[in-house]
Image (tube, rainbow, N blue to C red):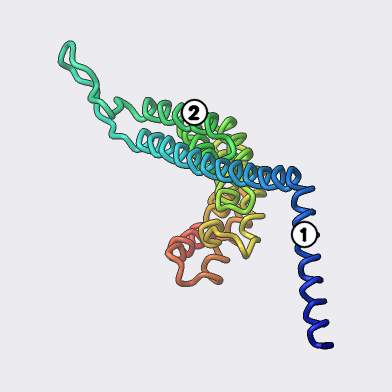
């Protein structure tokens, strides 16, 4: 008897519990519907955001590829036959190619700001400016890239390039400082022996013979297997 009562009691408890859940669902049907709808909306928005982000990156990458092709296009002298036109995809001079590449890189950077392609385009725009002899503009561009590069490889690369721009502008002391700081970094992606060679050559141009000799000696002592080691030894001998 007791067994049957316990059985009925459990059945009643289950039934009552089921009714409570059903009632709660009924009372909160609208809330549940709104909540589920909100979750679905969020998922859709996130999905679209990811798709749009990938699409933007793909478009930026394609535009960057076109700009790179422009920078690497062939230089073909202009035709001498009357009425003949420049061969498509070529440029008559290095300057004309650099100007076209600069415009293409600037367009990528402006159209796809915030993407990796834009950062890359800005870096190459700096290189084009340097090639055109616009050292001050190149320096500013490389500093902009370095500031926005985060932990990417373009940070130290832009710093190295900015030193080249400073040297081209005759700002040797500033260039030496940038290269000295880079040479002191042991976790840099740049080859330290290459940085030291640039530092030494810049010191030579700046008339800093002692500093140049010290930088060349570091290459020989710290990187004896470096492809720069032989040149460094010769430079040391010429400075003595």
Left or right: 31 with respect to 132? right
Against 144, residue 185 (above or below) is: below
- Which residue occupies the foreground of this view, 181 or 85? 85
Of all residues, the one furthest to the left in this rendering is 81
Q: Secondary structure at mark 1?
A: helix
Find residue 157 and report its horizontal and vertical position in percent: 55, 49
Q: Residue at x 16, y 11 (%)?
A: 82
| Residue at mark 1 to residue at mark 2: CA–CA distance | 61 Å
Q: Residue at x 53, y 52 (%)?
A: 198
Left or right: 91 with respect to 184? left
Find residue 232 and report its horizontal and vertical position in percent: 48, 62
- Report the quarter where the N terminus lies: bottom right
Find residue 111 and report its horizontal and vertical position in percent: 52, 30
Mark 1 or mark 2, whichever is nearer to me: 1
Q: How packed is label 1: few (under 14 Cα within 10 Å), some, or many (20 or more)?
A: few
Q: Which residue is mark 2?
A: 107
Q: How packed is label 2: few (under 14 Cα within 10 Å), some, or many (20 or more)?
A: some
- Which residue occupies the foreground of this view, 41 or 75? 41
Against 82, residue 214 (above or below) is: below
Q: Residue at x 45, y 62 (%)?
A: 228
Q: Secondary structure at mark 2?
A: helix
- Which residue occupies the foreground of this view, 12 or 74? 12
- Which residue occupies the foreground of this view, 214 or 157? 157
Looking at the image, is mark 1 or mark 2 earlier in the sequence?
A: 1
Q: Is residue 134 visible?
A: yes
Of all residues, the one furthest to the top in this rendering is 83
Q: Which mark is residue 21?
A: 1
């Amino acid at each position: 008897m007791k067994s049957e009562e316990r059985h009925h009691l459990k059945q009643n408890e289950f039934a009552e519990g089921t009714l409570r859940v059903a009632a709660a669902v009924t009372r909160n049907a609208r809330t549940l519907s709104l909540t589920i709808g909100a979750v679905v909306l969020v998922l859709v928005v996130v999905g679209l955001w990811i798709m749009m982000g990938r699409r933007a990156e793909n478009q930026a990458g394609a535009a960057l590829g076109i700009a790179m092709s422009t920078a690497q296009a062939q230089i073909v002298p202009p035709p001498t036959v009357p009425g003949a036109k420049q061969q498509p995809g070529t440029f008559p001079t290095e300057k004309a190619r650099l100007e076209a590449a600069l415009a293409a890189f600037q367009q990528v950077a402006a159209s796809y700001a915030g993407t990796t392609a834009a950062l890359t385009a800005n870096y190459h725009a700096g290189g084009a400016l340097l090639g055109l002899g616009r050292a001050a503009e190149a320096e500013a561009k490389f500093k902009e890239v370095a500031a926005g590069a985060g932990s990417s490889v373009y940070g130290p690369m832009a710093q190295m390039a900015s030193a080249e721009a400073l040297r081209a502008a005759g700002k040797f002391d500033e260039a030496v400082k940038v290269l000295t700081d880079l040479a002191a970094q042991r976790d840099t992606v740049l080859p330290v022996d290459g940085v030291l060679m640039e530092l030494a050559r810049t010191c030579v141009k700046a008339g800093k013979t002692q500093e140049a000799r010290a930088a060349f000696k570091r290459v020989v002592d710290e990187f004896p297997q470096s492809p720069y080691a032989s040149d460094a030894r010769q430079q040391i001998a010429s400075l003595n």
